[in-house]
Image (spheres, rainbow, N blue to C red):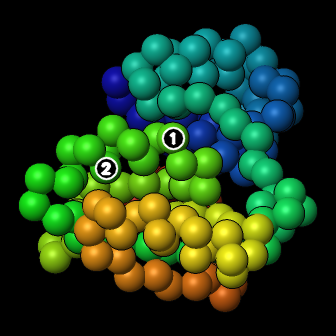
Amino acid sequence: MNIDKLNWAILESLQENARLSFSEIGRKVGLTSPAVAERVKKMEDAGIIKGYKTEVSYQKTGHHLKAIITLRAFMGRLKPFLEKVTEFKEVINCYRITGNENIIMEVIFQDQGHLEVFIDKLITYGETKTHIILSNVIEHAPVRNRKIT
């Protein structure tokens, strides 16, 4: 599917606020509400728009510590880890990566003790490195039309 200038404008509006009505988006991009709805439906069908979600403040839900943890799996422990990681409620993002480590996770904890308990679970799968996040510099940056001209 072609992502033209209007589709990019719609995508930018939705990424800024997914709760905008089609008529509000239409006013911003110069289309009618039905035309916006049709374009959004086509982008959903093509898998360009994967879904809509609610962003939740981890701090306000009692998680006062956020970290990035990398895992370098022991021989034969990567597959068991990949099967188990979906059960860890602390993990909010997990990626299998290239390089010395196999896994990088974004995790949230209630406090330092909670982090320690979590690391104790991980060390049965491999070596870990933990990086405490102090602040967000960029978070949920929108995907934009970045074609080189």
Seen from the viewer's position, the closer of residues 12 and 101 is 101
Q: Height in image: 32 above or below 133? A: above
* Residue 137 as seen in the image, left or right of residue 124: right
**In the image, residue 37 lies at what x, y percent?**
68, 16
User: Where is the N terminus found, in terms of image quarters?
Assistant: top left
- The residue singled out by tag 2 in the image is 81
Seen from the viewer's position, the closer of residues 87 and 103 is 87
**In the image, residue 73 lies at what x, y percent?**
21, 64
- The residue singled out by tag 1 in the image is 87
User: Where is the C terminus found, in terms of image quarters?
Assistant: bottom left
Amino acid type at circle 2 is Phe
Say which label, 2 or 1, has the lower sequence index: 2
| Residue furthest right as drawn | 60
Query: Could you say whether the residue bearing mark 2 is in a helix, strand or loop?
Result: helix
Badge number at residue 9: none
Query: Could you say whether the residue bearing mark 1 is in a helix, strand or loop?
Result: helix
Q: CA distance from mark 2 to mark 1?
A: 10 Å
Q: Height in image: 34 above or below 5? A: above
Residue contact between numbered discs 2 and 1, judged by CB atoms under 8 Å: no
* Residue 63 as seen in the image, left or right of residue 14: right
* Residue 10 as seen in the image, left or right of residue 30: left
